């Protein structure tokens, strides 16, 4: 369905539902080959479920896959681990919640997470970096059109790996996997680490502005009009929703290893986005003149936390915002702004949180924003898959 406004033109479409139970837990990623992948998440509060946990007659380590190409039927498929059913503890990642996954070049990478309602820490081997290579083929004996090859990536300095945690955020940029914030056994973190995917080495970087938080999001991008590569951070939860001042964005300059905080100009009509956590925040690019200055999209997320913690559902935002940067401002800390995207009435996803930030770049070079699963205010896990285009 198409919606129009004086700001932008949008298309919000419900692509497909995953008829295997709703999901939340911040794990599934999106990849640039038009495939939306999901594997490790939750259906019941804090109870990890793998795509192949035995319930659906598939081995642990299987991934659900959907092709996002508009020219093909959008149906879910199940990719089995290439190593077959006899999988050991060391050859496949254990089911978990609160892990972080990213797609980089030709593979999926996962780090962290915890297990079960008691949030039991995973052992050091399991919590490390896992790589999943997707192999597409003809019809497989189990019924799928491909398989997944898992590999535990050993760091040359495993003793310097980040502290075990869940509900952190991760992003891949320039052959590095960045791990930020999250919830360890007690408290919340603001640390930032990078794992070099070529040298296989961990590096401790400058921590983000306090307070420590879980459920935040990072976007990796280059500032328009400059050569600055940055990580953008919005929101999170530290006992209350962040940021304390609506609209504030933390900016990490990669080359300088320094954080700065900026206050983007408010939308002249709608103001600034409110505090939130477990939301969507993804890099944005567009060939449209109206949105060429946009660098990121912020959407949905938890507005007020449940008094039951992870066992309950709070209230959620259902809004969409563009974060813009005027390329005419040479100062990388100036020229930021917020622009609310009015998606109008009609068919649109219900407000939610606890879903993965996900997007892909379509054939025309424009970002497609993905909203999959999540927790609704009714405390039910959604199985919906939505796609948003902004042009």
Image (spheres, grey):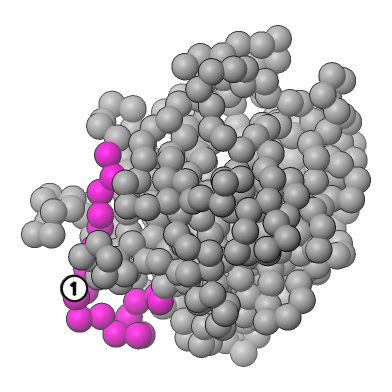
Residue 14 visible within the image? yes
Q: Nearer the viewer, residue 233 or 330?
A: 233
Q: Is 245 contained in the magenta span?
A: no
Highlighted range, magenta? 75-94
Decide if residue 352 is on the left or right side of residue 93: right
Q: Nearer the viewer, residue 384 or 77?
A: 384
Q: Position of residue 205 (x, y in %)?
A: 75, 71
Indicate whether 328 appears above or below 43.
above
Residue at (20% x, 81% y) in the render: 86
Q: Position of residue 232 (x, y in %)?
A: 74, 49
Residue at (53% x, 59% y) in the render: 25
Indicate whether 224 appears above or below 358.
above
Residue count near mark 1 (Cα–Cα under 10 Å), binned few <14, some 14–19, many ≥20: few
For the C terminus, the quadrant is top right
Q: Nearer the viewer, residue 161 or 255?
A: 161
Decide if residue 380 is on the left or right side of residue 39: right
Residue at (69% x, 68% y) in the render: 182
Residue at label 1? 84
Decide if residue 145 is on the left or right side of residue 160: left
Q: Nearer the viewer, residue 388 or 42?
A: 42
Residue at (56% x, 35% y) in the render: 350
């Amino acid at each position: 369905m198409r919606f129009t406004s004086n700001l932008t033109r949008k298309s919000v479409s419900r692509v497909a539902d995953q008829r295997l139970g709703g999901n939340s837990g911040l794990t599934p990623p999106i990849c640039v080959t038009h495939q939306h992948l999901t594997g490790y998440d939750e259906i019941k509060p804090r109870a990890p479920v793998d795509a192949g946990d035995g319930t659906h007659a598939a081995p642990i380590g299987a991934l659900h896959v959907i092709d996002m190409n508009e020219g093909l039927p959008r149906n879910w498929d199940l990719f089995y681990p290439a190593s077959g059913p006899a999988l050991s503890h060391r050859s496949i990642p254990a089911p978990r919640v609160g892990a972080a996954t990213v797609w980089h070049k030709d593979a999926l990478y996962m780090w962290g997470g915890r297990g079960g309602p008691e949030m039991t820490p995973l052992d050091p081997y399991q919590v490390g970096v896992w790589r999943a290579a997707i192999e597409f083929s003809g019809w497989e004996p189990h019924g799928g059109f491909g398989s997944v090859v898992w590999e535990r990536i050993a760091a040359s300095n495993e003793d310097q790996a980040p502290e075990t945690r869940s509900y952190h955020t991760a992003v891949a940029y320039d052959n590095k996997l960045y791990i930020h914030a999250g919830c360890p056994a007690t408290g919340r973190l603001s640390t930032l680490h990078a794992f070099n995917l070529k040298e296989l080495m961990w590096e401790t970087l400058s921590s983000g502005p306090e307070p420590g938080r879980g459920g935040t999001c990072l976007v990796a991008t280059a500032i328009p009009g400059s050569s600055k590569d940055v990580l953008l951070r919005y929101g999170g939860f530290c006992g209350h929703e962040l940021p304390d001042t609506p609209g504030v964005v933390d900016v990490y300059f990669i080359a300088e290893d320094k954080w700065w905080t900026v206050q983007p100009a408010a939308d002249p009509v709608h103001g600034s986005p409110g505090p939130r956590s477990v939301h969507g925040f993804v890099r944005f690019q567009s060939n449209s003149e109206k949105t060429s200055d946009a660098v990121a999209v912020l959407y949905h997320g938890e507005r007020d936390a449940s008094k039951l913690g992870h066992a309950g559902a709070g209230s959620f935002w259902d809004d969409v915002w563009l974060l813009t940067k005027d390329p005419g401002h040479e100062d990388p800390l100036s020229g930021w702004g917020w622009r609310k995207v009015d998606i109008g009435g009609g068919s649109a996803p219900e407000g939610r949180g606890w879903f993965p930030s996900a997007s892909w770049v379509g054939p025309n070079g424009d970002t497609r924003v993905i909203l999959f699963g999540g927790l609704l205010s009714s405390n039910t896990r959604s199985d919906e898959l939505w796609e948003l285009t902004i042009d």
